[in-house]
């Protein structure tokens, strides 16, 4: 038992903690506030406290639990809403009301609920980490696999099917160190990545149904992406769209230090969203971690580690998991405040010198892997982190350190957002380094000319940006017809393809096959337009063709009508443009 000797906001210094280790969890003061040791000098420990330290004073007791900060993993995680240190907010509200009482301890999982466990492993067999013991139907959408915890090898002595709570014994394993009891839950230290057999190369895209992402700047399953953007540019809406439509099995949404009203919107809307694939509530495959800006600053750091550890747990079951972190800038600001109170040497803009390492460690826990299971089942964690650079300045340290490790950059543009162009991803600034890795998948599953169409569309948009500089000087009418046609096709790509409404029942999601047909129709029209111009037609004449309005309405073609609608549209484009050229 130690005592407090100094208090500086969320940082507390304690003496007399004999035998303490780095990152041990401690209880501070009479209320037992949760804290974590982040510096040790002899028996003097510096503790970051995850709760408000108001009222804590020198002489208060500090008790070491001799355990590192960890999360409880088991059935009941899905549909839950936690704070940064995995306290269930619904339980806190039920016991405490709308305001959390400091020092309150609540189990992360419901200890009274009984789960129907179906044992599949054979008693007497040798088991290793990741081996499947049995299953629990956690929600109608997700079958929860009960696995041998990492680090446990031995002979399965007993295993029973039946109805159990997470605290009941379901069996035991005889290991070299003795008998290891088994329950439906296990604990894992949040700062240590869960082990895997092998990391796999990214070769399968995480399809999102968002055209600007899937076509131009795709992310692979197990990949990393960052969404930097200023206030009001649509970061949260994009992440909600990804959570709803991405072809992942489980979604972990971490609201790290965001404004209370924004997080309230997420907490209010997510339970009402429907999973489009099954028409079941989306929460049946979602876990929310809420840490708003008015919550204790130190808990922001814990929230991202809590989220990634839960994501790795479902990855180990063989699921594809998407983790949304909104936003990592608030996490970095929490690190900066703690570092300042520790009187560490500041780096660029006051952030700690280890900012880059911490950001890299977080993103490196993403990946598509072969799990520890004997059968080597694959699973993935895809990390999408939002960054909130002050004033939209992408040169600030958090954005730059994120760009060093994230392989996809979706640059949100305030100018596009002010023009009501959503998603407001700037196609000239954004990039994806996964295009080469997943090109083979696109060519085999979508179309052999996919890469050519994508490159041609990007070149058209780039050429438009160059021509706009001339247009601002001399006007559109001074351009040759061929260059007017480039501007015309680029506008179709921007308005009829890239612009997409998250709130329209049909336009909110576009299958990859439909994206291919839409882009091909626009670019084929552009080719026919250039041919018509050579025969004497003008862009003004071609813009008045009735087929143009049909091209602009492509996004509302139903998926079941995809083939016939686009076949007839392509035929009509060829006939209409050809007739216009012949008439001249």
Image (tube, rainbow, N blue to C red):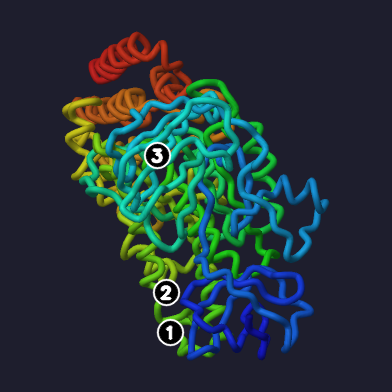
Q: Is residue 470 visible?
A: no
Mark number for residue 355? 2
Q: Position of residue 342 (x, y in %)?
A: 54, 86
**Quadrant of residue 469 in the image?**
bottom left
Ranked by sequence position, the earlier of labels 3 and 2 is 3
| 156 relative position to 241: left or right | left
User: Which residue is disc 3 drawn over?
Assistant: 147
* In-front residue for pair 47/418: 47
* Residue corresponding to mark 1: 347
Residue occupying the point 29% across, 49% down: 196
From the top left corner, tell me how far across and down residue 360 is, in percent: 35, 65
In the depicted structure, whether residue 442 falls above or below residue 484: above
Q: Nearer the viewer, residue 2 or 529?
A: 2
Label 3 sits on a secondary structure element that is: strand
Visible residue check, residue 554: yes
Question: If the image is split into quadrants, where does the C terminus sit?
Answer: top left
> Which image quadrant for residue 371?
top left
| Identity of the residue drawn at 47% across and 86% down | 346
Q: Quadrant of the N terminus?
A: bottom right
Q: Disc 1, disc 2: CB below 8 Å?
A: yes
Determine whether the residue tagged by mark 1 lies in a helix, strand or loop. Answer: loop
């Amino acid at each position: 038992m130690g005592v407090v000797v100094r208090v500086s906001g969320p940082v507390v210094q304690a003496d007399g903690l004999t035998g303490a280790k780095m990152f041990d969890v401690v209880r501070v003061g009479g209320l037992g506030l949760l804290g974590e040791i982040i510096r040790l000098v002899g028996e003097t420990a510096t503790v970051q406290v995850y709760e408000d330290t108001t009222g804590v004073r020198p002489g208060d007791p500090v008790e070491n639990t001799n355990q590192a900060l960890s999360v409880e993993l088991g059935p009941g995680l899905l549909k839950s809403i936690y704070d940064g240190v995995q306290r269930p907010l619904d339980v806190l509200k039920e016991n405490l009301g709308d305001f959390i009482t400091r020092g309150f301890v609540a189990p992360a999982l419901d200890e009274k609920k009984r789960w129907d466990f179906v044992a599949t492993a054979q008693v007497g067999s040798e088991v290793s980490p990741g081996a499947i013991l049995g299953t629990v139907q956690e929600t109608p959408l997700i079958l929860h696999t009960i696995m041998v915890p990492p680090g446990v090898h031995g002979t399965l002595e007993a295993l029973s099917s039946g109805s159990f709570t997470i605290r009941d014994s379901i069996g035991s394993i005889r290991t070299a160190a003795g008998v290891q009891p088994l329950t439906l839950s296990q604990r894992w230290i949040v700062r240590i990545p869960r082990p895997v057999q092998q990391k796999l190369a990214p070769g399968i895209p995480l399809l999102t149904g968002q055209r600007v992402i899937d076509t131009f700047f795709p992310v692979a399953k197990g990949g990393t992406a960052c969404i930097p953007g200023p206030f009001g540019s649509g970061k949260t809406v994009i992440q909600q769209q990804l959570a709803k439509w991405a072809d992942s099995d489980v979604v972990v949404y971490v609201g790290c230090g965001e404004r209370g009203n924004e997080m309230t919107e997420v907490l209010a809307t997510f339970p009402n969203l429907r999973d489009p694939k099954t028409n079941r509530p989306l929460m049946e495959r979602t876990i929310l971690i809420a840490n708003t800006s008015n919550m204790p600053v130190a808990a922001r750091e814990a929230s991202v580690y809590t989220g990634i550890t839960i994501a790795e747990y479902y990855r180990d079951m063989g699921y594809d998991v998407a983790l949304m972190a909104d936003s990592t800038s608030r996490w970095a600001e929490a690190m900066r405040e703690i570092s300042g109170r520790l009187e560490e040497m500041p780096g660029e803009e006051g952030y700690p010198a280890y900012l880059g390492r911490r950001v890299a460690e977080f993103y490196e826990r993403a990946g598509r892997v072969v799990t520890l299971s004997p059968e080597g089942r694959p699973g993935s964690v895809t990390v999408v982190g939002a960054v909130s650079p002050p004033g939209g300045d992408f040169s600030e340290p958090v954005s730059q350190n994120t760009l060093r490790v994230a392989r996809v950059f979706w640059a949100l543009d305030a100018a596009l957002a002010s023009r009501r162009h959503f998603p407001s991803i700037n196609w000239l600034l954004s990039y994806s380094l996964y295009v080469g890795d997943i090109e083979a998948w696109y060519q085999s599953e979508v179309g052999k000319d996919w890469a050519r169409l994508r490159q041609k569309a990007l070149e058209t948009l780039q050429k438009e940006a160059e021509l706009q500089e001339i247009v601002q000087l001399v006007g559109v009418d001074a351009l040759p017809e061929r260059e007017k046609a480039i501007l015309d096709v680029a506008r179709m790509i921007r308005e009829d393809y890239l612009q997409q409404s998250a709130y329209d029942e049909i336009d909110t999601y576009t299958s990859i096959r439909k994206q291919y047909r839409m882009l091909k129709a626009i670019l084929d029209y552009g080719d026919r337009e250039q041919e018509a111009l050579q025969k004497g037609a003008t862009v003004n004449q071609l813009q008045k063709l009735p087929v143009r309005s049909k091209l602009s309405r492509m996004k509302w073609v139903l998926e079941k009508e995809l083939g016939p609608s686009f076949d007839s549209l392509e035929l009509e484009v060829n006939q209409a443009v050809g007739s216009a050229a012949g008439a001249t």
